[in-house]
Amino acid sequence: MEPWLAAHLPVLDLALDAVRSVQRAAARAGRPADGGAGPADLAPPDPARVAAGFASDRVLTLDGQPVPGFAPLSGFFRTADGWVRTHANYPHHRSRLTDLVALPDDVGRDAFAERLAGLAAHDLEGQAARVGAIVARVRTEQEWRESAPGLAAASGPLVRVRVRDAGPIPRAVADGAAPLAGVRVLDLTRVIAGPVATRTLALLGADVLRVDPPDPAEIGWQHLDSGQGKRSTVLNLKDEHGHRTAQDLLDSADVLVTGYRPGAVEGLGLRVPPGVVTGRVSAWGDEGPWAGRRGFDSIVQAASGIALLEGRDGAPGALPAQALDHASGYLLAAGVVDALVLRDHDGLGRDVSVSLARTAAWLLDLPGRDPLHPAAAAPSGSGPADGPGVTVTHAGVTAARPVLPGYDDYPYPAHAWGTDAPGWRTRGGRGT
């Protein structure tokens, strides 16, 4: 086998297991992805297709050109006593970061690195958390496992499900050939994990409407990479009209998926109706001292010891893909599908949650480490001998194909960001 996603840690095993979780959930819904097979005889995911899907940011091209990836102030930086990793891809995160270290917002990477070299990693991390900037101190695996946030991250199930104490509202899981045909999903997510989850629900037939605030706008290439099969609208939930429209959408939805820290959606004042399934992905989980902190895949890798395991000569490195994000997204999608199946029997809403840190703990616990691994193979070419390649091109955008067997493309490419009306499609026999 080609060294797809080759790394010190068994990333491909993580990826394949996460994808299989969605396959099994679709099978339990009664209409599995590959045309009727039961959970025991599902077609195995193609490793090349899965590798391309997990490394989708490296596969994505716009008119033949690769996308820029991380912003200049995102990455690893030496400090006076170690290393930190920062995240500043969004303008507001960059501004908070430069304010934190008393530098102008337009500072270059070299001057920023020089400032951080004189500061303590521990102080930077703590101060950043207090002001909403995103900085993680690079830790060893042992240090993370023994820490309070590390212990909290490793506890509990990969996918946490809670039944809400709401009155049942009977609804059908699906009313068409696709596993989630007729299901409405309100998508309040950004970046990778949440959008991967909702893109998967769209692949399985759900009507997914992504709602973003007008500012900051989503990073353009990220929307093209994870917005396939969905519609995209913009609402300001802080004004009366936008909030009322969002609540009306939620009142007639089956699923609400969010990518915010615990309590953030409640802070927006949205009321989740009885019978609605909620899905949420966070960086650090629902419990523990870091539950309220912001974070991204790269930040969790740095804090959890993964970065040092994947580095060389004492310098930190990274996994060959944003694997924590993608795996968490597929796990969340699987949990939501299962919750919909259960709701079809008892009418109860459920809260489904995953966290990047819990997925990181899963990866760290998997057997099969390979410290002498070869370089990761670039996902390209064909999947199975009689199948299509691992990418598909629409209107100059080349993106990874779906990772689920039986699906060669998404229902449609990503719509232009924010250009759809804030409403649901009509669903046969179930109202508008």
Image (cartoon, rainbow, N blue to C red):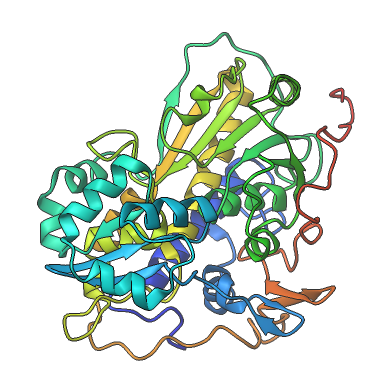
* 326 or 67, nearer to the observer: 67
Q: Which part of the image, by quadrant, shows the C terminus? A: top right
On screen, residue 44 versus residue 294, left or right, reads right
Position of residue 58 measured from the top left corner of the image (x, y, whole percent): 56, 77
* 333 or 429, nearer to the observer: 333
The residue depicted at 52 percent of the width and 68 percent of the height is: 54
Q: In which quarter of the image is residue 46?
A: bottom right
Residue 50 sits above or below residue 2 on the image? above
Q: Which part of the image, by quadrant, shows the N terminus? A: bottom left
On screen, residue 351 versus residue 218, left or right, reads left
Q: Is residue 189 visible?
A: yes
Residue 256 sits above or below residue 274 on the image? below
Position of residue 36 measured from the top left corner of the image (x, y, whole percent): 69, 53
The residue depicted at 71 percent of the width and 53 percent of the height is: 203
Residue 243 sits above or below residue 95 on the image? above
Count of all numbered marks drawn on residues in the image: 0
Quick one: which residue is furthest to the bottom in this view? 374
Q: In which quarter of the image is residue 141?
A: bottom left
Quick one: which residue is furthest to the top in this view? 167
The residue depicted at 49 percent of the width and 70 percent of the height is: 70
Q: Is residue 365 visible?
A: no
Position of residue 84 measured from the top left corner of the image (x, y, whole percent): 25, 65
Position of residue 337 measured from the top left corner of the image (x, y, whole percent): 58, 40
